[in-house]
Image (cartoon, helix red, strand yellow):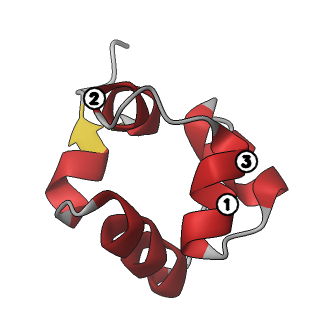
Amino acid sequence: MIRFTLDRLMFENNRMKVPELQEKSGVNKNTLYAIYNNTCTRVDLSVINRICNALHCQPGDLMVYEPDTQ
């Protein structure tokens, strides 16, 4: 499973809140909350690009792979 680490990145970035990231990135707040809460099922590359630009990070910093436990 792919899990987003947006919460950690935002905390490390001066404890940024979703509204501030929305302002910096231009990404819809509902999309950001879905990524933040790991409830999204797909994300456009343009959204990842805008988040990475706002947080000065790489796409690999934004997500991790965790094997499914079945």
Percent from the top left, x then y, of residue 67? 23, 27
Residue occupied by mark 2? 12
Q: Secondary structure at mark 1?
A: helix
Quadrant of the rendered structure where residue 18 is? top right
Please report contact status of discs 3 and 2: CB closer than 8 Å, yes or no: no
Residue occupied by mark 1? 22
Residue at 20 percent across and 60 percent down: it is 57
Pointer 3 or 2: first along the chain: 2
**Against 48, is 44 above or below?**
below
Please tell me which residue lies in front, 8 or 13: 13
Residue 70 appears in view? yes
How crowded pointer 2 is (Cα within 10 Å; few <14, some 14-19, many 20+) is rated as: few
How crowded pointer 1 is (Cα within 10 Å; few <14, some 14-19, many 20+) is rated as: some
Residue occupied by mark 3? 19
Residue at the far bottom: name it. 46
Give the amino acid type for the residue marked by disc 1 in the picture. Gln
Percent from the top left, x then y, of residue 32? 66, 52
Does residue 20 appear to the left or right of 30 in the view shown?
A: left
* Residue 11: numbered disc: none
Does residue 44 appear to the left or right of 27 in the view shown?
A: left
Question: Could you tell me which quadrant the N terminus lies in?
Answer: top left
**Against 16, is 70 above or below?**
above
